[in-house]
């Protein structure tokens, strides 16, 4: 199910690369990562299409069609999501590299800029889209949208700052932003310029043997610095929420923001949404998503886990 030439002005892509020999992301059990990611991809892409029907929505992956189980191909078809197959042959690092598969997002972007789409957006597989991105597309006509994990209010944290200093051989990181890898949106021209800067960072990393533990965020940060006058904070459209019992960071923006980024729900809420709704062609109400993804409160089981953890800490 390869996509044909671009047929709409805007594309929303969910990049996904898989290689059992390469390291995947955090917040997930490696032995069940393939299934969990595929379920999350279906949720992310289907919800994006439901709330942005005028956009082309696609999963872009290094997997051949026969490597994707029929169940997930059928789920994507039901929600009118396309599949674009592109190799992982750009921005590739060694298999043992932390977050080695995460760099595929930039590889995917480098292929998307070669299409006829006017505007390009990609985001992670652990999101749920609950609103329109119409205003974001308007913003992207003049700006490149990235998610600043510090919300523009704090400097780059020390470990990350040290990596930047070591790589660039500078004394400070004033003006640098920690851009999260969960969201990217730009018009095609800006995206091409960004990829060019990213390619320069990548080449320098390879030539010098420099290793980051920040995954694609390291390249996003350094390439983004070169375009800082054109970058707009994407926090009006996407927010990151931590929903586990041992680390919760939630505010009421989840009720209004267009995209919910839910890293802790890879093994919990998102698989539930897939099994209960997405695989049969349905779309859950926002209130169901908020509850099942632990945004409205801590489930009883989590409360027990937290209680046990707190008691152990006191011993």
Image (cartoon, rainbow, N blue to C red):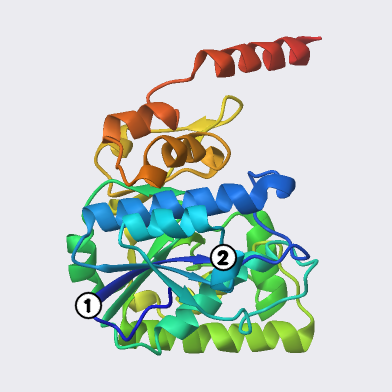
Asked which secondary structure carries label 1, the reply is: loop
Quadrant occupied by the N terminus: bottom left
Nearest the eye: 313 or 71: 71
Query: Would you say residue 156 is visible in this rendering?
Result: yes
User: Taking 99 as reference, is 287 left or right?
Assistant: left
- Label at residue 217: 2
Percent coordinates x, y for residue 287 in the rendering: 29, 29
Nearest the eye: 196 or 166: 196
Q: Residue at x 70, y 82 (%)?
A: 205
User: Taking 296 as reference, is 267 left or right?
Assistant: right
Whether tag 2 and tag 1 are in contact, CB under 8 A, the answer is no
In the displayed structure, would residue 296 be above or below residue 211?
A: above
- Which dot, 2 or 1, sits closer to the camera? 1
Q: Residue at x 32, y 38 (%)?
A: 254
In the displayed structure, would residue 84 be above or below residue 297?
A: below
- Label at residue 72: none
Q: Residue at x 76, y 77 (%)?
A: 210
User: Taking 127 as reference, is 255 left or right?
Assistant: left
Percent coordinates x, y for residue 81 in the rendering: 35, 63
Percent coordinates x, y for residue 177 in the rendering: 48, 64
> Label 2: few (<14), some or many (≥20) within 10 Å?
many
Between discs 2 and 1, the one toward the N terminus: 1
Percent coordinates x, y for residue 281 in the rendering: 32, 47
Residue that badge 1 annotates: 8
> Label 1: few (<14), some or many (≥20) within 10 Å?
some
Q: Residue at x 32, y 86 (%)?
A: 5
Q: CA distance from mark 2 to mark 1?
A: 29 Å
Asked which secondary structure carries label 2, the reply is: helix
Quadrant occupied by the C terminus: top right
Nearest the eye: 207 or 119: 119
């Amino acid at each position: 199910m390869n996509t044909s030439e671009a047929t709409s002005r805007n594309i929303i892509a969910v990049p996904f690369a898989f290689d059992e020999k390469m390291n995947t992301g955090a917040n997930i059990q490696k032995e069940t990562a393939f299934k969990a990611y595929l379920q999350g991809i279906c949720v992310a892409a289907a919800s994006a299409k439901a709330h942005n029907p005028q956009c082309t929505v696609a999963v872009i992956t290094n997997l051949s069609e026969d490597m994707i189980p029929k169940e997930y191909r059928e789920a994507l078809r039901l929600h009118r999501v396309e599949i674009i197959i592109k190799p992982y042959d750009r921005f590739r690092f060694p298999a043992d590299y932390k977050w080695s598969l995460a760099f595929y997002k930039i590889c995917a972007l480098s292929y998307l800029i070669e299409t006829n789409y006017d505007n390009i957006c990609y985001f992670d597989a652990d999101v749920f889209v609950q609103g329109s991105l119409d205003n974001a597309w308007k913003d992207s006509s003049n700006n490149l949208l990235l998610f600043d994990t510090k919300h523009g209010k704090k400097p780059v944290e020390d470990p990350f700052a040290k990596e930047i200093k070591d790589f660039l051989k500078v004394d400070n990181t004033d003006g640098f932003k920690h851009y999260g890898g969960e969201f990217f949106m730009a018009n095609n021209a800006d995206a091409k310029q960004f990829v060019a800067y990213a390619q320069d960072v990548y080449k320098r990393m390879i030539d010098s043997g420099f290793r980051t533990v920040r995954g694609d965020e390291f390249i996003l940060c350094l390439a983004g610095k070169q375009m800082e006058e054109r970058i707009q904070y994407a926090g009006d459209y996407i927010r990151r929420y931590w929903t586990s019992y041992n680390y919760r960071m939630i505010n009421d923006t989840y009720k209004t923001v267009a995209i919910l980024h839910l890293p802790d729900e890879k093994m919990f809420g998102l698989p539930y949404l897939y099994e209960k709704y997405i695989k049969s062609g349905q779309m859950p109400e926002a209130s169901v998503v908020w509850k099942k993804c632990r945004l409205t409160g801590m489930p009883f089981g989590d409360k027990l886990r937290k209680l046990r953890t707190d008691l152990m800490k006191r011993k």
